[in-house]
Amino acid sequence: MRSTMMDAPLQVARILEHGATVHGTAEVVTWTGAEPRRMTYAEVGRDAARLAHGLRAECGVTGDERVATFMWNNNEHLVAYFAVPSMGAVLHTLNLRLFPDQVAYIANHAEDRVVLVDTTLIPLLARAIGQMTTVRHVVVVGGGDPAPLVEAAGDRITVHTWDALLAGRPDTYDWPEVDERDAAALCYTSGTTGNPKGVAYSHRSIYLHSLQVCMPEGFGLAPTDRELAIVPMFHAMSWGLPFAAFLSGASLIMPDRFLQAAPIAEMIAAERPTLAGAVPTIWTDLLAYLDNHDVDTSSLTEVIVGGSACPPALMHAFADRHDIRVIHAWGMTEMSPLGSVSRPPAGVTGEEAWRYRYTQGRIPAGVQARIVGPAGEPLPADGTSVGELEVRGPWVTARYVGDGTPDEEKFRDGWLRTGDVGMLSPDGYITLTDRAKDVIKSGGEWISSVELENALMGHPAVLEACVVGVPDERWDERPLATVVVREGATVTAEELRDFLSTSVARWQLPERWAFIDAVPKTSVGKFDKKVVRSRYAEGELTVKELAGP
Amino acid sequence: MRSTMMDAPLQVARILEHGATVHGTAEVVTWTGAEPRRMTYAEVGRDAARLAHGLRAECGVTGDERVATFMWNNNEHLVAYFAVPSMGAVLHTLNLRLFPDQVAYIANHAEDRVVLVDTTLIPLLARAIGQMTTVRHVVVVGGGDPAPLVEAAGDRITVHTWDALLAGRPDTYDWPEVDERDAAALCYTSGTTGNPKGVAYSHRSIYLHSLQVCMPEGFGLAPTDRELAIVPMFHAMSWGLPFAAFLSGASLIMPDRFLQAAPIAEMIAAERPTLAGAVPTIWTDLLAYLDNHDVDTSSLTEVIVGGSACPPALMHAFADRHDIRVIHAWGMTEMSPLGSVSRPPAGVTGEEAWRYRYTQGRIPAGVQARIVGPAGEPLPADGTSVGELEVRGPWVTARYVGDGTPDEEKFRDGWLRTGDVGMLSPDGYITLTDRAKDVIKSGGEWISSVELENALMGHPAVLEACVVGVPDERWDERPLATVVVREGATVTAEELRDFLSTSVARWQLPERWAFIDAVPKTSVGKFDKKVVRSRYAEGELTVKELAGP
Ligand SMILES: Nc1ncnc2c1ncn2[C@@H]1O[C@H](COP(=O)(O)O)[C@@H](O)[C@H]1O
């Protein structure tokens, strides 16, 4: 029996129209170092229409052509987020932290036709654009000199300015009805091996994912919220926050290129966000800053931390010293990215609640999860069986862009293999112990690098700790602990090992220790363990060896 | 460009599985007058599997056959809500307040094959089942004597008991993957003219609607909530609360047949709901009860009031005297039913916030609304233009069950004509002034019956007031005010008219007044204006006439 319901597609244009009218007075604020730039959502709606008209008229964008962005989190990026998918084209957010040839590879793979670039990023784009063979138009946001781009790409590209492209265009656009399963946006994962791989989000997946982000069990966005969106718009759609904000009416605060602790602290004091989202390293830096400066963070009640495991010590420090609730979340580019958010179950308090909050979080109805053993056999969701986590659902990718059939390394029987290893509890909480490739295989037993890191980061003298497996004659692999000591503090390897021994089994205690200035990070701010391993292999680290197990 | 996202259908079985596992310890509680009956969501999941197996094995339910319920809000009804759509069949909630021949008409129109009936409702069903020509199986919940049913229907039907049907069945069911646009549930509107008309909700519409119900701007459901679901499960899917509860992990409190103020007050004190939902008349009764009895309502922070216009006086009384926030919501069976929820915009306080809260509320992204003038011309959403409200969206019906093409009286160019008259503000707030058919046309001008009612119900001596248009020689139509006086109070027509004249234009003041014992109500608890008009026409009311305009 067919239902009698209307056949209304879930599409980005609907989110835009809703935000720009019903929540027309909500605002997006971009930090500039000086006076912030502000726009209402009604103005974002107007500029999205103008941009779409401009892209069609001046850059000939039609159908599902790809329009790329090479931009920080700012007002214009937000306008592009809505304009491009709403007009039926495909938004491609380029990761500006990648090497130029990676960026070019991605742009070519996606067949990008237009690139929107922030003035401050012209020099960076200039290093890649020569190799971007499909790009025909560049739109410069912010009035900078495009000469380096023209020099690099010659007359293959036409350069426009954002202001001229939008000037005099109509304030509305008759957004087409789309097939909700068509691509709305593209994001490439900064894979640590091989070439980057693309994921094409659909209008449907973006819409459903945005609803989940807004849910009380998600980030709980409401019109009274002001969300500081630090997580880059070029990384997994900034966790879907731009779309969720327009759905819910929450205002947005955008850091642009000011991602250091000092300006972020200033933004918090001045713009009074209620919520914020970023990777752990940003919060680690900010915590150190807040501990040493008098900053009014009273507006901020909750920060979402994801992208890497959130050290429990970080959660406690924010709670105890700054009255800010750190909520742990887990996701991947391949899942739009929200997989789980760690709010404890109803009625659970005290130590037990904290134990829930350390986990990667609870899955929503839109995500199904299972744990799979080494031979591909599903393991019980009993909270103790350890295996690879697999997921599926309407905002999870089924394959990578351009692949005829799903890559067997990454997909199994309709499930995405996350490459994350851990447990699933009967009530849907995920606890990750490691990335599959970062697990340390010591004498046939597994050691979780993340557990060692979390324990180490609980020591007051440790700012950051990154643990990797390194080759060992006797045990195959053993942990190497690399540690960044907090400014003004001192600590020895022996002291740290003794500290660890109170919470970690003896045979798991690292014997190799290196004190380093900073943990190398990937393009999206995660610990880059590949680099740590290769530095070790090249003998670039000063390693202290204690007695082994 | 196709997206790479998985093709995961939105389906009721997914909501069930999520609730029964991730929120397996949440509970549903059914009031019994004595010890309440409790089930966890895990047990609901188990019983849903058992019921599905029983329906298939004993009643031969296959494909999209219709399984009807003739039940109060209780545990078993909740089990049926999930089992029937999850197995691919269609749940049909019969309205037990209708006349027997209407119930039979609806069951025949839907071609119901099975009816699940509460023991206490056997006598009522017995009056209709003789005419239900497609029904073959009746399942009695609660162990009552089915003799009256067999007497009425003869051996056309086989009678089962709930317990026997479920006994020994497997605890799990391999729920089929469905087309998300297929029917999951049927509900007929108790139209005030003509035969009832059916709406077939899809798996997709139920899923999307449930997400909206859970949103902070919707009812804001979270695992810490306990929702007292007074709104009948046979009326517009109990506002989608059962599904939303399983999505969000909120617990449910079900009143069964105990819908009077005294037991509801008892339920609140004993089961400590945080939220509740019902039509205004229930709250009016409860308010009177709470004002005269010492009841602990401290758990209850918010009640959603919809189904009819919520008198502002009711909101203020609950806020002032019981510290309970009354949130006004608007919807229709044809829209699943949620259309709008009245939470004031961010930053608005005091009197202005109250003015927002009096409105029918703000539309979510899933609902588009417009105001249309008498000639079918769209009017601006400027907050002042008055016309018929039209809506569309993924959980709005496009037609009625069995209609080849949409009924032109109710649908226009892909929009549902709500039959409600009012205004739409630029920021998406709907203010209804009347039902199109209840607007009083006085000398070419419109008088809103609802405005007069709300003003009258602001008088301390007035319990309820129902205003209808009655024929008038000179003005075509004029308002007749029928008033129920609060117990122990006295008031005259002159006093009420003087009271009204402080807030209502002189020419709108009713000259005809009748004091009545109770306002007649429809099967779903709304003022039945058709009955009031006919009582007046038949001369059954004692009418006092004051001077006209
Ligand atoms: N809360 C978290 N805890 C541990 N690992 C995480 C967390 N969030 C994200 N990740 C890791 O980041 C990966 C996704 O990377 P990306 O697609 O770049 O966002 C996941 O597969 C995890 O390995």
Image (cartoon, coloured by chain):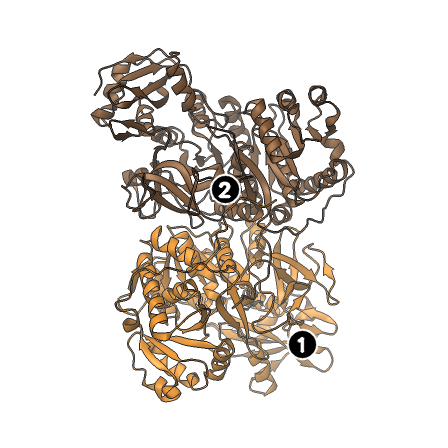
Chain colours: A orange, B brown
Res B140 quadrant in image: top right
Q: Nearer the viewer, mark 2 or mark 1?
A: 2
Mark 1 element type: strand
Badge 1 crowding class, 10 Å Cα cut-off, few under 14, some 14 to 19, many 20 or more, is many
User: Is residue A198 placed above or below A124 in the rendered structure?
Assistant: above
Marks 2 and 1 share the same chain: no
Q: Is residue B448 above or below residue B40?
A: above
Residue A295 seen in render:
no
Q: Which mark is residue A478?
A: 1
Secondary element at tag 2:
loop
Q: Quadrant of residue B309?
A: top left
Q: Which residue is mark 2?
A: B399
Q: In which of the image's four quarters is ligand 1 placed?
A: bottom right
Residue B164's place in the image compared with A384, above or below, is above
Instruction: State how far apart marks 2 and 1 are (Cα).
Output: 67 Å
Residue A155, quarter of picture: bottom left
